[in-house]
Amino acid sequence: MSDKATLQKKYDQSRASIAILIVFTIVNIALLFTDADIMFLFSFTIPYWSAIFGYLFEAYAFYAISAAFLLILAVCWFFSKKHFAWFIPALVLFCLDTAYLVYVTIDLGEGANVTDIIIHIYAFYCLISGIYYGYKLRSTPKDKDTASLPSSPLRLAEDVKHRVLLETDYQGYHICYRRVKGTNELVVNGYVYDEYKKIVEFPHTLTARFEDAVITSGYDNSQSFITVNGVEIARKTRIV
């Protein structure tokens, strides 16, 4: 995998951390209205506590604060796909969120929040990483000398039990993006050219280079895709 592809992978993982924070926060708020005695710590504090105040005092203004906070973060996540600068307002909001969590922990004596603070520090690292890798990604020029070199196959694609994530034929290439156990593979004409080994999938791109074609396949948070020379030729929504 090239340096640029590695940076893209790390950047996509940082974007995924924002999405997970938003989703877990929404789930936590939903759990307020049930009898469930659980919550996810990898979430935002301000929208959660705002929802609590709204629930306790029946004040819709607190619900509005919670919704606005999450909406701004969702906008930052969506547009960060185009430019890493959208990580900056997300980071500012998260710093305010962490400051409020520290206030709750110290002034209200909520000792159990220490674990939450540690998780916030990790999330803070994820957001900082997004800015760092996004900047590196935009400032790293494409290596034209190595980009045109053919890549060697890793191995013959064995006829084993697998799940086809996306498959197509294009200009003499049979391209299959598949999952074998915990590994996603890019198979071109019966050979595996690139792979992604993760139990839990994050957005990623696999690449195979030939003399006249650069073939990629991967996952972008919701859909599988296949491109040839930068032109998308297949896409499919992923359920799981």
Image (tube, rainbow, N blue to C red):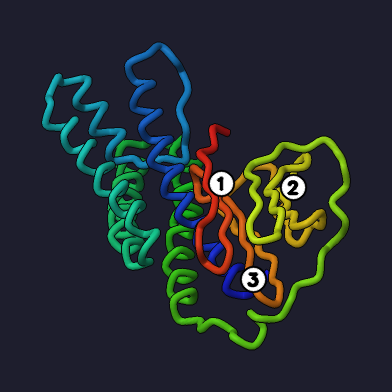
Alpha-carbon distance for marks 3 and 1? 20 Å
Label 2 SS: strand
Q: Residue 3 appears at what percent x and percent y?
A: 62, 75
Query: Which badge, 3 or 1, is on the more N-terminal residue?
Result: 3
Alpha-carbon distance for marks 3 and 2? 24 Å
Q: Residue at x 33, y 40 (%)?
A: 45
Q: Quadrant of residue 162?
A: top right
| Amino acid tagged 1 | Ser
Circle number at residue 30:
none
Query: Which badge, 2 or 1, is on the more N-terminal residue?
Result: 2
Disc 1 crowd rating (10 Å Cα; few below 14, some 14-19, many 20+) is many
Q: Is residue 121 left or right of residue 105?
A: right
Q: Nearer the viewer, residue 23 or 120?
A: 23
Q: Residue 159 appears at what percent x and percent y?
A: 87, 42
**Quadrant placement of the N terminus:** bottom right
Alpha-carbon distance for marks 2 and 1? 15 Å
Q: Residue 21 appears at what percent x and percent y?
A: 42, 43
Q: Residue at x 81, y 65 (%)?
A: 153
**Quadrant placement of the C terminus:** top right
Q: Nearer the viewer, residue 139 or 68?
A: 139
User: Disc 3 vs disc 1: Cβ atoms closer than 8 Å?
Assistant: no
Disc 3 crowd rating (10 Å Cα; few below 14, some 14-19, many 20+) is some
* Pointer 1 residue: 224
User: Disc 3 vs disc 2: Cβ atoms closer than 8 Å?
Assistant: no
Q: Residue at x 54, y 50 (%)?
A: 234
State whether residue 174 is above or below residue 137: above
| Amino acid tagged 2 | Thr
State whether residue 206 is above or below residue 19: below
